Amino acid sequence: MSPPSAPLDGFAYGEHLEGLPPRSLGYRLLAPPEPAPWSAEVEALARRLQGAPYPDHWPPTDLFCSVLLADGRRLIAVARYGLADHTPSRRRGGLELIGVLAPAELDVSSALAVYRWLQARRAQSDNLHALGGHFALAEVLAEVAPAPAPADPVPVLPIRLWQEGALLFAATAPSDPDHRLGLLDQGAGRAWQWLPLVGSDFPLAAYAQRGPLVAWTPHLAGVAVKVDRKHQEDAPRAPRTSGLLVAVSAVLLILLILLAGATLWETASLRHQVAGLAAQPPAATRPEGPTGRAAPEQPAAADESRERFADALHDVLESRMKGEWEKARPHLLAAYEHAAAGRPELRLKDSDVKGKEALGAVLVLSGRSADRVDEVVRMALKDKGYDPALVRAAAERVRQQLIDDLKDGPP
């Protein structure tokens, strides 16, 4: 815990405006007015955060940020995403980073209190140039109201997990990072770090060398960044795992079981709905022949029935997969083409795009079997520092859970 008299140095990064009406001169560090030894590093961090691919349909939001700088001090800031600039086109993608530099050993609760103080300070002034200055930690903490009761959001899984690096999560809503700040209660230690939304070019590995790091990225960004810490070349060392990463990794094993079970349950439900569609009688009756018997079904009628079934199946699958459908669509068509190349009886008319997507979705979902999920769990946890017996037990537990869930059928 830092002493009450610990100093805090304020800074503000944002849009530089000039004249009336205000004219935009771009984004830069606006406070302090004179460069400090740390100014270049803080401005570089702000520019990298501004480079995150913030989705257009997300509203502006404030997010918590705290990392360790090269000089060992802790940066605590409000990152304000999704702002519109003051150019004639009012472009979105602007960012403000308003914060302070504090002692590195500041605990999580005190850092979050400083975060709320920064939010209140920004709300009271639109002049970013005036948001610098020097403050005493004790005075700042005395001004902050008690923290609100923590929320209980749906758990999330990391995109990537590395023992000697960082946890990278995907945010499905702009406020997701702040709603999951409870992750920092899991034995964060003294060198903890928390980054809000970042892009694929953010130097996560450099920050991960300074301490355990939790980072976020918008779920629409194609981010798959390995963030291992670099080992010393000539000095092998035993693996070190921070309390934060150990605690979250343990939760990860449980979440993998729940996620895999839900996935297979959903697949089984879709199969039942497909069977129900196939059993439905055709909407129109076949015409009778001269003898009063039904005339033989013509190939054209068979093709029409086939397309009608495929379209109905498409609608069922799309409604069940919802937001996942659009992102999966190219892969669904590719799966259809691959299957139809070896099984001509599966081929549909070129114009029947919905049918092709439906068949591709069935093929993709059929690959989410208990054995396949068992394999995925083993691969995800392999060479991450876990005991091999624990990995085998977790994979087998997932596999058995999926089989048990299927005994009673889908809901």
Image (tube, rainbow, N blue to C red):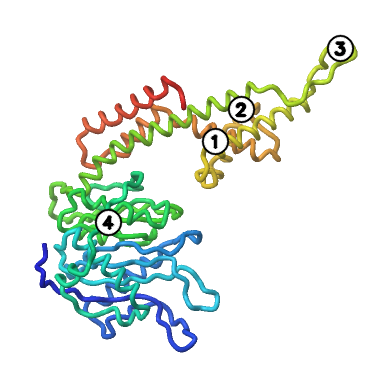
Label placed on residue 343:
2
Mark 3 or 4: the one toward you:
4
Q: Please identify the quarter of the rendering in which residue 374 is found.
A: top left
Find out whether the residues at labels 2 and 1 contact each other: C-beta distance under 8 Å: no
Left or right placement of residue 263 versus residue 164 in this view: right
Label placed on residue 292:
3
Q: Residue at x 13, y 50 (%)?
A: 237
Left or right placement of residue 94 versus residue 351 in this view: left
Which residue was labeled with disc 4?
148
Earlier-in-chain disc, 2 versus 1: 2
Dot 2: within a 10 Å radius of its alpha carbon, few (fewer than 14), some, or many (20 or more) residues? few
Above/below status of 407 relative to 374: above
Q: CA distance from mark 4 to mark 1?
A: 44 Å
Above/below status of 380 relative to 64: above
Q: Residue at x 31, y 51 (%)?
A: 180
Dot 4: within a 10 Å radius of its alpha carbon, few (fewer than 14), some, or many (20 or more) residues? few
Find out whether the residues at labels 2 and 4 contact each other: C-beta distance under 8 Å: no
Count all numbered tags in the image, as a single digit.
4
Residue type for callout 2: Arg
**Image position, residue 391 (x, y; %):** 25, 33
Label placed on residue 283:
none
Dot 3: within a 10 Å radius of its alpha carbon, few (fewer than 14), some, or many (20 or more) residues? few
Dot 1: within a 10 Å radius of its alpha carbon, few (fewer than 14), some, or many (20 or more) residues? many
Earlier-in-chain disc, 2 versus 4: 4
Q: Please identify the quarter of the rendering in which residue 350 is found.
A: top right
Residue type for callout 4: Pro
Left or right placement of residue 268 versus residue 161 in this view: right
